[in-house]
Each structure stands twice: as C-alpha cells, then as structure tokens.
Image (cartoon, rainbow, N blue to C red):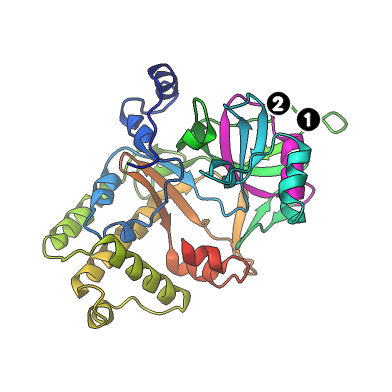
Amino acid sequence: MEGVRILNDLVLNEVIATLPHPVFFTFVFTMTKNTHIEHPEDSILTGDLSVLDAFLLPLLLSLKIDGAPAIVWGRNPATGCQFVGTKSVFNKKKIIICETLSDIEKHYAHKPALEKILMWCMGYLPITKNIYQGDFIGFGGAKNYRPNTLTYKFQETVDAKIIIAPHTKYFAVNDLRDAIAMPLTEKLESVDNFDVRKFSPSVKFVQPRAYIRSEYGAPLGEGVDSFNDLQVLVDHAKKLAEDVDFVDERTAKKIKVNINALIREGKEVDGDVFEWAGLCSASLIELWHTVNEIKLAALQSCKDEADFETCVMGDPQPIQGEGYVMVSRFGYYKLVNRRAFSYANFNNDKFAAFARAA
C-alpha cells in the first residue's frame, strides 16, 4: 500500500508492548499515517464487509471530539528538535514544520487565529520524545467551548492555558513523512510546564475513557471489548450481502456524495432513487441501511466518562456526544448518528466545506 512504512524491530517491539492487546494490535503498523476514518455503512459499498467482523472482534473505543484545528506536536526525528504544526507537517512536498516562534510567524502570519494557537501550543505543550496529534478545544479561562459544531460545557472554569484532545500517536524513525499512526492509549499529563503562580497545569488534556457496556442495565464503568450482542444483526447483513451487486471505488465516491447531500438536506436515502439514477442497485442501499442500523445499535452500547456536557450548536439540551471512534484490526470507523449530528455539522457554515469533503 502506498505510503505504508514498516518500523524496525526494536521500535516495533517497544510499541507493541504498550498496547492493551499486544499481539492483536500489531495490525496497526500496516496502516498509513493519514488513514481516513470511514462510516461503517459507507465502507461496504465496494463489497468490503470487514466492518461486520470488526464489530464482533476485540477493539479499542474512544470518544470522538469535535475540535479544530488539528494540532501535531513532539520531537522532529529529522532534527531532534521540538515542533508544533497542523497536519501539514506530514505533507510530501510543501512540508510546514514549526520548531521556533519565527517559523510560526513565517508560515502563519496570514492566519492570525491559527498563528496564535500554534504560538501558545509551542509555549505550553510539554516537551516530549514522542509525536502526538490532537484537536484544539480552546484557550483556558472559561467553562464553555465551541471549537466547531458542538459546545463542550465543563463543570469548572478551565484554569489551564490551552485545552487539547489528543487521540493519535505517531512513530517515525527518520522523517515525519514516514510516520506511522496508531491510536493513543496512554493518558497524557502536562508535567514539564506549569503556571507557578496558580499551581495549575499549562495544558488540559481531554481524554475521557470510552467503553462498551457489557449489557443493558450493567453497572456503568463495566465494559467489554467487542459488540458481541450484535451477532444476529451482523449475520443478517452478511446474508443480505450475498445478493448485492457492489460498485467500484469511483462509483462508491459518487454514492457517498449523494448520501451526504441527502443527509445535509434532511431527506431519506431511498434505494429505488439510487437505482433509477443508475448509481447502484436498490439492494446495495438496503444493505447500507442495515449496516447503519448495526452502527446505531452499537452506539447504544457505547459509554464514556467525560467530565463535561456536550450540546449541539445553540441547543442547551446535552447529548451523548458526537460519537465514538472504533479501532479494529480492519481499520478505523466512526460511530456517529449522522441524522442527529452530521445534519448540524453540514449546516454549520464555517465547517460545511470540510464536512462535505469527509
């Protein structure tokens, strides 16, 4: 696969030893650094039914945080220096890595809001030998934050300087362009930098535990590592798939664009309409709906221990959150109620263009 890099044995063994399922999660190292997180129902359009098995096998679950922009930081393997940046640090050609304040001014002076964020990240993120990525939530000093479509309401005023939701750890031997991504499983703490006047950490890392509730009515906090109770639904989906005509990647992309448009407009995804338009058979859309129902059932079993409330845009009523990210041996999948969240996200003018591209 293009862009895939295999780490040397020493680094590989060191990384595997830190994982909750060491042998099982060696699959992570065959993934590219910018793996697209797919909706389970969208992933089956070409006939790849891996997600159905993914629901039933051991996996990792994390709360999906709706922050912006994405921040990448750590030690640059090419220079040994600390750096901050956006996902542009991984560009193959126009690489933008900031190791000094002057670098930030040089590359982002034309974007003052982003320039300020990166300046503060450089000043307050702890020095580390690793490479991390997270979503920027905001600057400290408030209780409520809306970095994107969702509003996060903390119980107390955040006294840290910046708020970051880290989610990915990268490993690179010689160059950031060769970095390999894997889900972040350890908790980050701001210990290198702190405000001595207030004795408060410089960074609030938002990493709430997420887990699969073992069964309905089970004690909160008690979790399992797979959606075993979805076995019947998964078997039904596999049976349906036997009579489905799948499409190629190019056609699948067109189908996704149309599905996103329908969700954005609050309309139904009708298989007969897709068949009439010559995009695919109605049976493929029926399977899409079935996998979507499996995803929604899985969402009902997902719980987390977030210390904040989540609200959609101007609605004061808290929701469970944007959703969760499911990491399996087959890849990353996002468990999101598209009708409840994506509709709002698509209609958030500031981020509509990015959402449609996703």
Q: Is residue 120 visible?
A: no
Amino acid identity at mark 1:
Phe
Percent of width and height locating residue 95: 59, 43
Amino acid identity at mark 2:
Val
Q: Give the structural element (helix, strand or loop) at label 2.
A: loop
Horizontal side, residue 150 vs residue 185: left or right: right
Q: Which residue is mark 1?
A: 194
Q: Which residue is mark 2?
A: 191
Residue name at image x 51 percent, y 64 percent: 355
Specify the quadrant that holds the N terminus: top left
Residue name at image x 46 percent, y 48 percent: 303
- Name the residue at the right extreme: 197
Percent of width and height locating residue 352: 55, 68
Percent of width and height locating residue 68: 62, 53
Where is 217 relative to 195, above or below? below
Residue name at image x 42 percent, y 51 percent: 37
Percent of width and height locating residue 243: 11, 65
Q: Is residue 226 magenta?
A: no
- Name the residue at the top extreme: 10
Residue name at image x 69 percent, y 44 percent: 163
Q: Give the structural element (helix, strand or loop) at label 1.
A: strand
Residues at marks 2 and 1 touching, judged by CB atoms closer than 8 Å: yes
The disc at residue 332 is none
Q: Is residue 135 magenta?
A: yes
Which range of residues does the magenta coloring cover?
A: 115-142
